[in-house]
């Protein structure tokens, strides 16, 4: 998509930066904090009738208690494969089948695991910051091209660059705030 005015460019940059924040928040939902969350089981893939499908396509996932996830499997024949998929997903969870329901207790986190999760959260946040900075770079390059093509003046280019930098700083602050919130959540006992 060729962008030949600043309003469209700004809208595109805002959309892409907001997307980076949304992706970070979604990744944070998958980090286990000692509290049950249905998002914790999002990465689980189940073998079902010869194909690999996401868990939510073979069962309902719910959180009846703060430290328990229940997985109501639709097909009784799939209970064992759902249980195995959760156990093998590398989440450190130990599911137990009870009829057509698989109960997944969330164990409390130990100090070492909390520190590991903080590092993972930091990596996610850094990836999001890099993504935002790449969007800023694309915006700056587009401004230079617009100035070179005579669409905007050099003074307008400088002013728009300041706008983009301010928006970038604001977005990175949102990322940092989300990281601080997640770290606080991880370290709560």
Image: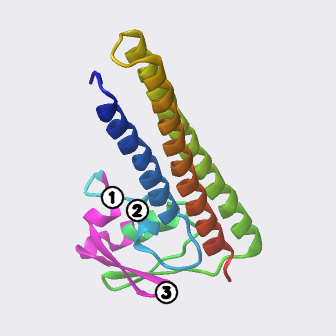
Residues tagged 1 and 2 counted as in contact (Cβ below 8 A): yes
Instruction: Say which residue appears at 50% left-offset and 60% top-offset.
Output: 89
Q: Between residue 36 and residue 3, name the one nearer to us.
A: 3
Instruction: Say which residue appears at 30% left-offset and 69% top-offset.
Output: 78
Whether residue 112 can be seen here: yes
Residue under pointer 2: 42
Residue 85 circle label: none
Instruction: Give me the C-alpha separation between circle 1 and circle 3.
Output: 23 Å
Q: Earlier in the sequence, mark 1 or mark 2?
A: 2
Q: Earlier in the sequence, mark 3 or mark 2?
A: 2
Q: Is residue 51 above or below residue 164?
A: below
Whether residue 146 sits left or right of residue 59 in the image: it is right
Residue farthest toward the front in the current orientation of the protein: 155
Instruction: Say which residue appears at 41% left-offset and 18% top-offset.
Output: 153
Q: Is residue 59 above or below residue 1?
A: below
Whether residue 54 sits left or right of residue 129 in the image: it is left
Instruction: Say which residue appears at 38% left-offset and 68% top-offset.
Output: 82
> For the residue labelled by badge 2, is the local secondary structure a helix, a strand or a loop?
loop
> For the residue labelled by badge 3, is the local secondary structure a helix, a strand or a loop?
loop
Residue 188 place in picture, x, y as percent:
66, 80
Q: Earlier in the sequence, mark 1 or mark 3?
A: 1
Whether residue 105 sits left or right of residue 82 in the image: it is right
Q: Between residue 77 and residue 128, name the one nearer to us.
A: 128
Residue under pointer 1: 54
Q: Is residue 126 above or below residue 40?
A: above
Residue under pointer 3: 66
Q: Which residues are magenta?
A: 52-81
Q: Which marked residue is nearer to the observer: mark 1 or mark 3?
A: 3
């Amino acid at each position: 998509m060729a962008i030949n005015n600043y309003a469209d460019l700004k809208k595109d940059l805002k959309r892409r930066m907001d997307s980076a924040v949304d992706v970070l928040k979604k990744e944070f939902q998958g980090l286990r904090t000692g509290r049950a969350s249905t998002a914790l089981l999002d990465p689980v893939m189940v073998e079902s009738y010869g194909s690999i499908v996401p868990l939510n396509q073979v069962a309902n996932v719910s959180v009846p208690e703060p430290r328990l996830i229940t997985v109501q499997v639709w097909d009784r024949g799939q209970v064992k494969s759902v249980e195995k998929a959760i156990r093998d997903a590398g989440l450190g969870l130990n599911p137990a089948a009870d009829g057509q329901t698989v109960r997944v207790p969330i164990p409390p986190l130990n100090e070492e695991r909390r520190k590991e999760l903080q590092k993972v959260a930091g990596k996610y946040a850094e990836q999001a910051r890099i993504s935002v900075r790449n969007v800023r770079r694309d915006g700056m390059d587009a401004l230079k091209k617009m100035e070179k093509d005579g669409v905007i003046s050099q003074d307008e280019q400088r002013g728009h660059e300041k706008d983009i930098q301010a928006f970038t700083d604001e977005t990175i602050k949102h990322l940092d705030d989300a990281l601080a919130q997640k770290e606080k959540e991880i370290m709560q006992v």
